[in-house]
Image (tube, helix red, strand yellow):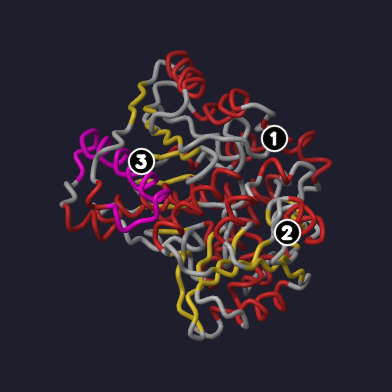
Amino acid sequence: MYRLRTLEDVNELLSRHVTQPSQFVKDAYKLDRMRSLMAALGNPQDFYKCIHVAGTSGKTSTSYYIAAMLKAAGKKVGLTVSPHVDDVNERVQINLKPLPENKFCSELNIFMGLLEKIDIKPTYFELLVAFAFWQFKRAGVEYAVIEVGLGGLLDGTNVITRSDKVCAITDIDLDHTEVLGNTIAEITVQKAGIIQQSNRVIMHKQPDEVMKIVNEKVVEQSGELTVAEEASLDNTTTALPFYQQRNFKLALAVYKYLQVRDNLKHLDDSVVQQLAKTYIPARMEIVEYEGKTIIMDGAHNAQKMQALAESLKAKYSGQKIATLLAVVESPDFTARTDLGAIIDLSDHIILTSFGGKQDLPKVSVDPERVSEHCRQMGFKNLTVVKSPEVAFSELLKRSEPLLLITGSFYLMNHVRPLIRSDV
């Protein structure tokens, strides 16, 4: 019998389910185990309407916005996202509220008891996705918004079989190339893998090779494709960062489709404007702290870093910025990130490191390597502070009025508690 009482207990339990990278591609990145697990649980994921969100950039924000719109329409909505930014219960939300700690633990105790009887050992990610699906059924949600973890085709979330599933596909770019493929075409095939029989697919217009592959998949599955209109609601979303405007508009296109299909409530302009302010942790999150403006954004690939840089330049034109940066270890980190975009807007950069165990073990690139790369690009206003906690205290001492923390959501796991304990 499980006796989880705190989220610390949960994290200790989950640590035993973390998959080593060497085994991930070989053993974990397939759906056999997840399908067996969900069947043993009675396929709870097929008891409510689902919106399945895939893509490279903007998945979490788009998911939050869709969930917020459905909640505003009076529907009971489940939301699961990954990775979590602060606490693991962010991965199981009802009406945009993570399950309270005591509820999360008590429900997970019951769930783990079921797993023992089933005798299937899921990965960290699979366990939490299965728990979310199961919990959403127990809570009686009407809709669930499900963010893909990695790729789509073989992702643990891709077990929803309802023909009325809606697939929202955000912007696609190179990411997780060691698993998904080395080209945009290969990665698009993986992302489009969430499209099942008769599904509606909603996305912005993207490069021709992306649209061609998605369209072929839609035709193969006898689905329908809706291309969201770029020009809509510009006045409503102008207060958002550029990249969030695109995510919000995609979410609104999804809602408008559901509004017609399911006879949902019309959301007037004033409601939509409020929804554009939906809180999304560590996505262009701005906090006033000790007399400084701190901007937290988990931008961790080239597409996200470029979008972040453009948004900051537009919002804070001419203001000096000091940046705290760490990026996830990868053999090709210089190719998969866009440090040039961060360098261009930073007056000083503090490079740090991190470690973490969500889904897969995560460590940062040695900040000395990042420093060398930055110097090769001609940027020398650098400090290396390997402890993220010490690095944050050094960031607070900087004279620049704007302080940016970016490069990875796993860096946020170390730094945000330092802020949250005081604000």
The residue closer to the viewer here, 386 or 252, is 386
Which residue does the numbered mark 1 point to in the structure image?
177
Is 241 inside the magenta-drawn segment? yes
Residue 17 is situated, as x and y percent measured from the top left of the image, at 74, 53
Q: Secondary structure at mark 2?
A: strand
Eye-nearest disc, 2 or 3:
3
Task: Point out which mark residue 250 bears.
Answer: 3
Residue 346 is situated, as x and y percent measured from the top left of the image, at 58, 63
Q: Residues within 10 Å of mark 3 (few under 14, many from 20)?
A: many
Which residue does the numbered mark 2 point to in the structure image?
357
Residue furthest to the front in view is 378
Q: Which range is magenta? A: 237-264
Relative to 251, does residue 420 appear above or below in the rendering? Answer: below
Q: Residues within 10 Å of mark 1 (few under 14, many from 20)?
A: some
Label 2 – label 1 distance at C-alpha: 20 Å
Q: Secondary structure at mark 3?
A: helix
Q: Amino acid at mark 3?
A: Leu
Residue 58 is situated, as x and y percent measured from the top left of the image, at 48, 46
